[in-house]
Amino acid sequence: MRRRTAALGSAGALITGTLVAGALAAPAASADQRHRPDPETRGTAVAAQRAADQGIDWQDCPADWGLEKPIQCGWVTVPVDYARPNGKQIQIAVDRIGSTGTPTERQGALLYNPGGPGASGLRFPRRVTTNNAIWAGAAKAYDFVGFDPRGVGHSAPISCVDPTEFVKGPKLDPVPDSEADKRAQRKLAAEYSEGCAEKSGDILPYINTLNTARDLDVVRAALGEKKLNFVGVSYGTYLGAVYGTLFPTHVRRMVLDSVVNPSKRKIWYEANLDQDVAFEIRLKDWMTWVAQHDATYHLGDTYAEVREQWETLRADAKKNPLGGKVGPAELIGFFQNAPYYDSMWVPVAEAWSAYAAGDPQPLIEAAAADLTDTAGNAASENGTAVYTAVECADAPWPTSWKKWDRDNSRLHERNPFMTWSNAWLNLPCATWSTPRQQPTEVRTGKGLPPVLITQAERDAATPYEGAVELHQRFKGSRLITERDAGSHGITNLANPCLNTRVEAYLLTGKLDSRDVTCAPHATPKP
C-alpha cells in the first residue's frame, strides 16, 4: 500500500498474437458460465487482441519524464469500460529497457508495480541504468517494463482537488480533541469525495483493481508476451493476486512482495485498521533503535524517553507550527517514513536530533518537502486521488460515522501514532458517490503456476498475516519470511538469503521444496 501522504486536512507494478478464449475466462462457478464469460472478460479479450495486433511504438521518453536513454517509452490503448471494449479509450504509459544478456538468455518482459494504489512504475527500468546489483541477474534475462496504472501519472490522470491546495500546511491535527474537531475532519473528507466526483467523474467509476488487472493483461499482449512475468510490491501484490485469479493461465512467473491481505473481509476498511496496530509496533522498533544510539542522537536512552520526546515535539508543533507550516499532521507524514522503511531510520533520526539540538531547519525542510516542491505537488495529489478512488471502489465501506468513530477511538487508545491520521485519509470512502464492487475472491485458478511470496515479519504497511492469507489461497506458492525485520518492499534490499531465491525463481521458475525463513537484513547504523 502506498506511503501515507499529508492529505485531506490530516496526516499528511502473445508471441503469435493469438488469444485462447478459454484462457481468458475468469474462474467460473458453473459450466454454463464457462461457456458464457461476463462482458468484461469478453471485452478484455477484444482489447488484448487489438493490442497484440498493434504492438507498442517505442520511442525515446519525453524529456520531462526523467527517464534516461536507453529507456524507451510508449503507449497501450485500453477501454475505459471493459464491458464496452469499442467505447471510450484511454492510453496507458509504459516504458522498458532491453535485457542485458545474450539473445539465448532472454526470457521476455518483466512487468512491475510498486504499489499505492496510485504509484507509478515507470522508474523500474532505472534499476538497470543505475546498476542495481540486486537485479543484475534478472536484468540479463528480462526486459524491465514499467507502467503508470490507469488514473496515475501519464495514464489518464485523475484529480480530486487543486494540487496547490492539497499540499498546503499546516493541516488540522489528525488527533481530535473534541467533537468539533471530528466534525471539521468529516467535512473535509466529504468535500474531498465530492471533489473527486466533480473533477474526475467520467472515468472515476472505472478506476479500480479489477480494471487495472485487465489493463495489465492488455499490456502483456501489446508487449507480444504469451504469459506474464510480474513483480508486485505492496498494493502491487493485490493487483497481482487479482490478476492471477482472473487470468491464471496467463501467468508465467509472479513475485509478490509485502502482501496486502486479500481476504474479502479485509479489503479495504479492516486492512487499514490492521495497519494502525502494525505501525505502532514498528514505530517502537525504530524508537528503541534510536535509544540504543543515544550517544549519536541524544533523544533519550530508553524507548520511553524517546517516545516522550516525540510527544513533546508533537505538542510543540501543534501549539506553534514549525516554520509556520509544519504541524502534527506534517510531522506524522515525515516520521511515518521510519516505520515504513529501514532506509529512513537514520535520516528521520538525524533531522529530529538536529531539532532537539537547536537547529530546526533540517526537520522543517524534510517535513515540509511536499509543501515546497511545486513539481511534486501534482504527483502527490494525483497519487492520493488514485489511492482513494481504487480503495473506495474496490469494496463496500461503512457509511455510519458511529462505526468509524467507535473503531478508531478504540484503536487510538493503544495505537495513537497513525490511527486517526489513517482514518481521515480513508473517510472519503464513507460518502463515495460512484458504485462499489464486491472484493474479488482471490484464489488459485486452474493453470496458475507456483507464485513466490516474500514478506518481512514486522512490516507496518502490510502486516504479516496478509502474506499467510495469500499463501493459503494460492496453492503451490512458497513464502519467504524475513524474520525479525519490518522494512516494506524487501526484494530491493540486500539480503542474500532472499535475493538469491528471488533471482533463481525468476531465472528458472524453481522454488524451495518448503517455505523459507531468512535472517533479517542488516540493521541500519548511524
Image (cartoon, rainbow, N blue to C red):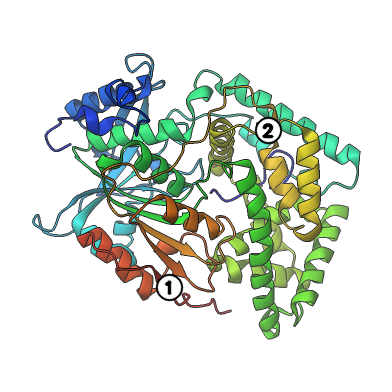
The three-letter amino acid code for the residue at tag 2 is Pro
The residue under the point 70% across, 36% down is 427
Res 86 seen here: yes
**In what element is the residue under mark 1?**
strand
Indicate left or right for 130 with 173 as reference.
Answer: left
Binning the other alpha carbons within 10 Å of mark 2 as few (below 14), some (14 to 19) or many (20 upward) gives many
Can you name the residue that lies furthest to the front here? 31
Residue 247 against residue 123 in the figure, above or below:
above
Q: Mark 2 or 1 closer to N-term?
A: 2
Q: Is residue 174 visible?
A: no
The image quadrant that residue 77 belongs to is top left
Badge 2 is on which residue?
Answer: 428
Front residue of 280/319: it is 280
Name the front one of labels 2 and 1.
1
Q: How much space separates mark 2 and mark 1, taking CA atoms?
A: 39 Å
Q: Nearer the viewer, residue 455 or 67?
A: 455
Tell me the tag on residue 517: 1
Q: Which mark is residue 147?
A: none
Instruction: Give how far across and how far down residue 218 sits, in percent.
Output: 29, 32
Residue at left offset 63%, top offset 66%: 282
In the image, is 218 to the left or to the right of 430? Answer: left
**Residue 336 horizontal/vertical position (percent):** 65, 58
Of the residues shown, which amino acid type is indicated by label 1?
Answer: Thr
Residue 294 picture location, percent across and down = 71, 82
Name above or below for residue 243 compared with residue 345: above
